Amino acid sequence: MQFIPLDSAQQLAKIKQSPAPVVIFKHNTTCPISKGVHRGLEQDGSELGNTPVYLLDLMAHRDLSDAVAEQFQIPHESPQILVIKNGGCTYSESMLHISAAATAEALQD
């Protein structure tokens, strides 16, 4: 699976307007839990099919993380995975509860 770096407000605006579902993975590059979740998503990412998966590096882009929390009205957590559909967040999970299988299921709902 290829992660798409999420590093601009313009990208976030496009994600919000996307007609197709999109996944955002908020990743803390210094956190061992986040690193483990990242590895798990890389290994099992094929379960997400062709859904774009954006990686938001929280250490480099805290401002974007704050914007995600505000725009989608979800509390900030780390690591965190979000499914964005029709301009809103329809699924959010954090920490060790994150899995490609659960995210794939949320994409189908």
Image (tube, helix red, strand yellow):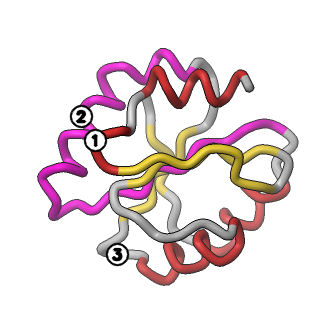
How many residues crowd around disc 1 within 10 Å: few (fewer than 14), some, or many (20 or more)? Answer: few
**Residue plotted at (18% across, 49% down):** 33
- 89 vs 95, left or right, is right
Quadrant of the image containing the N terminus: top left
> Is residue 8 highlighted in magenta?
no
Give the residue type that dot 1 points to. Answer: Leu
Q: Nearer the viewer, mark 2 or mark 3?
A: 2
Give the residue type that dot 3 points to. Answer: Ala
Give the residue type that dot 2 points to. Answer: Arg
- 58 vs 82, left or right, is left
Of pointers 3 and 1, the one earlier in the residue sequence? 3
Examine the image and state in which quarter residue 59 appears. Answer: bottom left
Rendered view: 35 above or below 11: above
The Cα–Cα distance between marks 1 and 2, rounded to whole angstroms, is 12 Å
The image position of residue 63, as x and y in percent, is 49, 83
The image position of residue 96, as x and y in percent, is 28, 41
**Residue plotted at (74% across, 38% down):** 21
The image position of residue 78, as x and y in percent, is 34, 61
**Residue 79: image tag:** none
Q: Which residue is mark 3?
A: 60
**Viewer-nearest residue: 105 or 42:** 105
**Viewer-nearest residue: 80 or 24:** 80
Rendered view: 46 above or below 74: above
Of pointers 2 and 3, the one earlier in the residue sequence? 2
**Residue plotted at (39% across, 30% down):** 99
**Residue 39: image tag:** 2
**Residue plotted at (69% across, 65% down):** 72
Q: Which residue is mark 1?
A: 96
Quadrant of the image containing the C terminus: top right
The Cα–Cα distance between marks 2 and 3, rounded to whole angstroms, is 19 Å
Total numbered labels placed on residues in the image: 3
